Structures are given as structure tokens and as C-alpha cells.
Amino acid sequence: MKSSDTSTAAGPLRGVRILDMATVLAAPFAATLCGDMGAEVVKLELPNGHDPLRALAPVMGEHSLFWKVTNRGKKGITLDVRKPEGRELFLKLLPDFDVLVENFRTGTLERWGLDIETLHRHNPGLVVLRLTGFGQTGPYASRPGFARIFEAMSGFAHLTGEEGRPPQHMNYPLGDVIAGLFGAFAISTALAGRARNADGSGLRGCEVDLSATEALFRLLDPLAAEFQHMGLARSRAGSRATYTAPSNIYETGDGHWLTLVGSSDVTFMRLCAAMGRPELANDERFITNAKRIAHMLEIDDMVTRWCASLPLSELSALMERHLVPYSKVYTIEDIVNDEQVKARQAIIQLPDADLGEVAAPCAVPRFKGYDMPIPRTGPAAGEHNAEVYAAAGLGADEIQNLSASGVI
């Protein structure tokens, strides 16, 4: 990847322009993922620059690392669309964008006079991504939503934790970033559909209603069918999988943790060979996945004792020799030092005016034939006001007056 301080990359979405007026994480992450693929993203904040993400840890002094990496590659403008002058300027900007991203509570844009009909009247081809906790309809539509709420209501948290112990959340807003992934997918899908369905009168936009809770539940594919037809309500089982065996996290003899999977018949055979117990592969109790599930505690006990008897280095050598899928459970220190991560440049350094460089994950996925520049970190509040508003036809005096009156 080449380093660049511009927000437009030579990626598959080059030429797409996105106006991101969302706050915190889920919807802005959707826009950032599109930016990684080459879209030009303009980040719109209120003039006070008080997006809650700027205060979400990690914050180093006055620098929000979360903001810098999550809003990477974006241009930053400020605008108070709640004021009449701000609304007028917002609608003036709108025709220059392909996508609008928002995540305000249902009904908020309508109260500001920015209902979907008004938006499409000013830009008939506009794709509007509306990402909320529960969607635009239903009895919960107006409820506030946060990642842990989505994780709890989707059933995700119910599956996380030890058997017989309370459900757990992970120490990261997983619900937000998963919703953001669905948001980026929705934007790309809508743009593809818009291009395919364009008629002689021009591009036709659409409104995308994305519920973050539904996004998380969508990942739990078989649970509803499992409950409907088998009367089973899947619950917590620690790190042990209850749908295949063996699959768990095990402690090594020298105090490391590793995960391994021996679920298919062939893989289980390889694991047995690595353990020095090839006969187990032909044991009637373990000969199919269904039978291994029925005897998973016995298998787990054997694998646990084997892992505890050897240091990580020996276990790794045996499993690599026998092609057993495994990994040490990595810390971030392990990740940044891993030879695969280094070889693929999976961690990139974002140019930053305050800190010089900020480490961040690379763009995913990689498209062959595209030369993807490295984006700069997230913008300061209103950093690109002069550039963006001048391009919209405002003079320097107008921009200054709008700033003085708190509109931008």
C-alpha cells in the first residue's frame, strides 16, 4: 500500500461520494469500510465537535485514538442542520453525494425537516442508509440503542460465557462493528441496484432500513430452526462448541492458551495421530461428528490432558506436522509481531498530524489490480470546511459568516 493524505483511493468504489452524518461507531464504521474501498467520505459533525466517539477510550491526552482509526480517510466538515441556515446548506450539498449515512433515533431527521421525501426531492438518486438499534418500524423503533443492547436482544450475549454462569459481553462493542459491516454491504448493494435499475430519467435512490439487532441475529443462522423443530434453546458452553467436537480452548503445559478444531472426520484423524493415539479415530464412540458430540466430554478430557502435558512449542510442531487447525490465543502483542501479519502488511500506519503515525488494520478485502493508498487518520472537527463549502459554491465571506453564527 502507498501512503496518501487524500481521502479518495483508487479502489472499486472510486467515484462514489458518501456524506456521513452519523455519530459514534456503527454507521460511521460502515462509511469507513466504503472509504477503504475507494469511496470519498465526508464526515459531518456539529460545530462543537462533541461526537461521543471522541471521548470513547482509548483517549491519549486530547487525542482520541478510536476517532482517528474509525474515521480514517474522511474529510471533516461541521454543520448544524437543526438551524434553518444549516438545513438549507445541507440540502444544497446533497446533490453532490451518492450516499447519506445517518443513525439518529427514528423520527429525528423528520423533525428537522429532512424526511426521506425531502432528501429525494433534492437528490433523486440518493441512497440513504438509516442504521438504528431496532429499525424504522415496530414498537421499539424509537428506543435508544447501543452495542451491548443489540448483543443482548439478538441472543448473542446469551451464547457467551461459561455454562451455569451469567451471560457475558466481550470487551469491545461487537454489536456496533457487525452492524457497520451490514451497513457497508447495504450501501454497496444499493449502489449496484441503483446502477442496474437506472432508467432514462436518471438514477433512482432508495432508503435502507438497517436494524443493528437484526444484523446480529442474522449471524445466528440455525438457532430459530433449532428451536422450532427440535425444541432446543442453545445456551452458554464456555469455549466449547456444542455443534462439533472436539473444539475448545486448552491450556498448554507452559501456561499458554490455544484453540484447536478437530471437527471433520479427517481432521479428527489427524488430531489423533498428533496425540499419538491413532486408534481413537476408529473408536466407535468417535467415528462421526454426531458420535463425538455425544461423547464430547470424554474427548475434551483427553485433549485437555494432552495439551497440559506439553509446552506450546511442542504442541505447535505436532499439530503443524499433522495439519491440525490450531492457534495460540493471540494478544495484540502477538498479532503485531506475527510473521503472517507482517508478510501481508495487515497492520498499516495511518499518517497523523498529531502523532506522526497511528497503527490500524489494513483494508479488507484486497482487490487485485487496485493500488490502494493508505488513508490518513480521522479529521479534526471542521478541518475541511473551507474546501468542501467552497466546492459547493460558497465564498470565503459566506463561510466566515456561517462559522461566526455557529451554523458551521
Image (cartoon, rainbow, N blue to C red):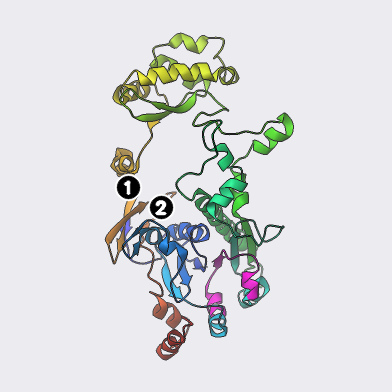
Q: Amino acid at mark 1?
A: Gln
Choose the circle earlier in sequence order: 1 or 2: 1
Q: Is residue 109 magenta?
A: yes
Q: Quadrant of the N terminus?
A: bottom left
Vertical side of 166 occupied by 137: above or below: below
How far from the left and from the top, in percent, is residue 347?
Answer: 33, 49
Q: Regarding mark 1 in the picture, which secondary structure is present there?
A: loop
- The image quarter in which residue 332 lies: top left
Q: Regarding mark 2 in the picture, which secondary structure is present there?
A: loop
| Residue matched to label 1 | 345
Within 10 Å of disc 2 (Cα), the crowding (few <14, some 14-19, many 20+) is: many
Span highlighted in magenta in the image: 90-111
| Residue matched to label 2 | 363
Q: Amino acid at mark 2?
A: Ala
Numbered circles on residues, count: 2
Residue reaching furthest to the bottom: 397
Residues tagged 1 and 2 counted as in contact (Cβ below 8 A): no
Q: In this rendering, does residue 199 appear at all?
A: yes
How far from the left and from the top, in percent, is residue 254?
Answer: 30, 25
Q: Could you say which is closer to the camera, residue 202 or residue 212?
A: 212
Please name the residue shown 60% across and 20% down the image: 290
In the picture, measured across the screen, residue 14 lies left or right of residue 284, that is left
Residue reaching furthest to the front: 165
